[in-house]
Amino acid sequence: MSRTSLSGRPDAAPAAGSKALSRWLAVLSLAALAVACGAVLMGMLVMMDTQIEMNPHGDPLVRQDAVGFRISAWAGISVVILLLAAGTVGAWAAYRKGRNRLSFRLSLLAAAPIFLLMIGIAFIYLGISP
């Protein structure tokens, strides 16, 4: 039985995804998973580091700064993980439907935080400060 659209005409078969795009999405998915795990690890390290400043007998302004730092750190981590997840899942969904251009564009959404992280590491390694 062939598929038909709402107009009653038969739908065209979805375009087959290219092997290069499939490989790109596989590599991107693994890199996104690694970066997401690293981001969660950084969040846990921030929690451990600011635990010292959360001393109830310490300075209340220091506690307030620690809470603000935790919130801003986890907000940044959440944005990175959201971009990685949306780009990766969206790219695979578009690839499955045969929309290769959309799939590649959505994969760039997930690749942006990874590339920015790599550029930041390169700047640190080279000693370049903003």
Image (cartoon, grey):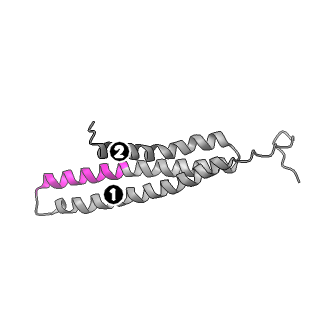
Determine the secondary structure under disc 2.
Answer: helix
Q: Position of residue 120 (x, y in %)?
A: 35, 44
* Residue 39 relative to residue 18: left or right: left
Q: Is residue 34 left or right of residue 123?
A: right
Image point 32% across, 42% down: which residue?
A: 123
Residue 22: where, in percent of width, then height? Answer: 64, 51
Quadrant position of residue 100: top right
Query: Residue 11, how many percent across, how many down?
Result: 82, 43
The part of the image, by quadrant, that contains residue 47 is bottom left
Looking at this view, is 64 or 111 the one in front?
111
Residue topped by disc 2: 122
Residue 13 badge: none
Q: Secondary structure at mark 1?
A: helix
Please provide the residue range marked out in magenta.
59-76
- Which comes before the other along the chain, label 1 or label 2? 1
Q: Is residue 59 above or below residue 4?
A: below
Q: Please tell me whether the stretch drawn in magenta is mainly helix, strand or loop.
A: helix
Q: Mark 2: which amino acid?
A: Ala
